[in-house]
Image (cartoon, rainbow, N blue to C red):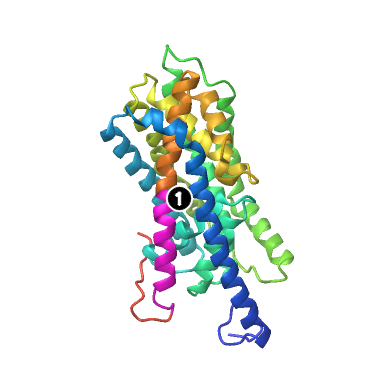
Amino acid sequence: MSSSDPDAAGARPPGRSRAARLLRWGGIAIAILAIALLAKTLADQWSSIRSAIAHANVGWILVGLVCAAASMAGLGLLWWRCLHAFGERPSKREALAWYFGGELGKYVPGGIWPVLGRGELAQRAGVRRSTSYVTTLISYGAMCIAAAMACGILAPFIAADRNGKGLGWGWLMVAFIPIGAIAVHPAIMGRLLELGRKITHGRVELRAQPWPTMLELIAWSIPTWLLVGGTSVAVTEALGYDQHPARVAFAAIAAWILGFLAVPVPAGAGLRELVFLAVCGLPHAPAVAVAAIARLLFIIVDGGGGITGLWYARHQPSSSSPEKEQETVP
């Protein structure tokens, strides 16, 4: 490997060691800040959560928690599959640790912190920085398209409900399906990666993957989004509210994606709840209760998964260790 390769090990100029230390301590500071802001998010919403959860069915709440954990792990595995598609071979355990550790950054304003956190954790373990960052962005795009497809799957069930009030502007989510499918075609993706190569002066050297590969990544993550919707459905059942499950799931998925796209808002705070209220069809007070408890479940998953992920990333074997688990995408 050439010494001019920015990702080459053992060929860094002396100044890089100091920069690496600063980056490391900066990452620790951001992680601490993210955990503090996550705790603040929970504290700010606790009054509305406490009154609602006092009369909730515990069994359904546990179902919602399992759905939340499975959905977040599914999004982490989407990134793992994306890394494999572009030539990296981390284990599932490693990728999930980096994913959850980086996800703590979404509670910090700015939107860039989950990308930065995940990318740096992967790079420290031996993944090329350019690949870790680019695949993170590609997985974000794939998951947004998959969310629109999940909404498209749910929409006919809502339309068939005679007691429903219609989706209104929620139907716009379905328009993302053809747009997203075209966006991952090699003719488009190749141009975007080439643009990235030019902007980064050759540091990004990734080739567009075949269209079926990209479509498979998207299709694989659709069940993950149905689990995201299932979390809110379980909470609705736990609180004893009557609403079509497909409509509640649709509203939850739409709220997640629009909250995600609101980059300056930490974890979509507030915006997700507003979107859910507008689409779910529940009266205002029940909708607020469902949204608040569902957010609590995801905060628990983010907090537990993030702290565990950071601990594992701190203690995992080096990338050159023969004990490192090698897994291939089935």
Question: Label 1: how many residues lie within 10 Å, few (<14), some (14-19) or many (20+)?
Answer: few
Residue lying farthest left?
59
For label 1, the residue is 216
Q: Position of residue 70 (x, y in %)?
A: 36, 47
Height in image: 309 above or below 158? below
- The amino acid type found where label 1 is placed reads Glu
Q: Is residue 81 visible?
A: no
Height in image: 156 above or below 77? above
Asked if the stretch drawn in magenta spans residue 325, the answer is no
Q: Main secondary structure of the magenta part?
A: helix
Identify the residue at horizontal 57%, vertical 64% (top origin): 29
Q: Position of residue 268 (x, y in %)?
A: 57, 41
Q: How many marks?
A: 1
Q: On the rendered structure, is 229 left or right of 135?
A: left
Range of magenta residues: 301-319
Image quadrant of residue 131?
A: bottom right
Taking depth in this image into account, of 243 and 175 the one nearest to the observer is 243
